[in-house]
Image: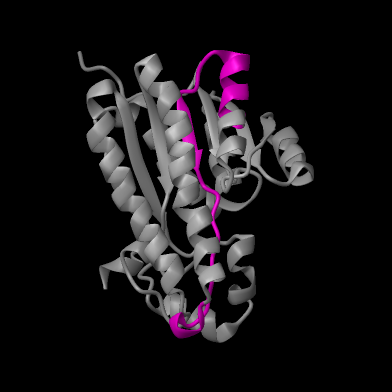
Amino acid sequence: MHNRVDFTLAERVALVTGGATGIGLAAATALREFGATVYIGGRREDIGEESARRIGATYVHLDVTSSDSVDAAVRSVVQEHGRLDVSVHSAGARLNKPAEDTTDEEWRMVFDTNIDGVFRCCRAAGRVMLEAGGGSIINVASMSAHAVNRPQRQAAYNASKSAVIQYTKSLAGEWGDRNVRVNSISPGYTETAMTALSRAKPEMVDAWLSKTPLARFAKPEEIAGAVVYLASKASSFVTGSDIVVDGGYTVW
């Protein structure tokens, strides 16, 4: 008799950065629904506390641009539960601006959140998981790591998300023999606050959806399914992978 595919997350402790809104909140909600004890990490206490209350999670202050803040947040989770099994890194920043007009400060802002933040979170969570003998780290990249989106100009964002995928693969190679799995997901255009302004412009919607085979935007919960899979035993032989959830945008 074969063992069943196991998506349950009972007795797992999970941290989701950027978990108060958008894809991060959908991921935190899904992890909670499948049985995990969930912490939402973010800078805004008001939004974080409210989101955590709604889904039965706990808010912890976490600024991904600060190593001290990241380390303190992970420490507080471990002190309370003695473990950290799943760490999802969803905090992100976007810049839609021509490359020739992008300033040093704007470039650094995007990279400080999107890849440096992932580095800080992976390092803090990884240390805990390596000592414990296992865990699952899930980094949120983007389909923009695989394709150059049009018509917006976002070279800094695209480059930062490509770095997330390569860093994910590198960690998977280093930590696999110690049972710490590291994967990423690459969402497509999703109905979140981050895309709201662009989704209000018919010309943007037409451009985006004409290049998407499913011809619609994703709901945040449709991205969260990949997070549950990577967090659970169902993906126990998966590491160093990037799951693209883009409605087919990158097939053309």
Vertical relation: 202 (above or below) 35: below
Q: Which residues are magenta?
A: 73-102
Q: How is the image coloured?
A: one colour
Q: Residue at x 55, y 50 (%)?
A: 91
x and y percentages locating residue 149 in the rendered image: 40, 75
Front-lying residue, 39 or 65: 65
Q: Quadrant of the N terminus?
A: top left
x and y percentages locating residue 226 in the rendered image: 40, 43
- Residue 15 shown left or right of residue 239 in the figure: right
Front-lying residue, 6 or 241: 241
Residue 92 is inside the magenta segment = yes
- Residue 68 shown left or right of residue 227 in the figure: right
Front-lying residue, 106 or 172: 106
* Name of the residue lying farthest toward the front: 104
Vertical relation: 11 (above or below) 226: above
x and y percentages locating residue 158 in the rendered image: 40, 67
Count the marks: how many? 0
Front-lying residue, 227 or 167: 167
**Which quadrant of the structure image shows residue 80?**
top right
Q: Residue at x 26, y 17 (%)?
A: 3
- Residue 188 shown left or right of residue 173 in the figure: right
**Which quadrant of the structure image shows residue 42?**
top right
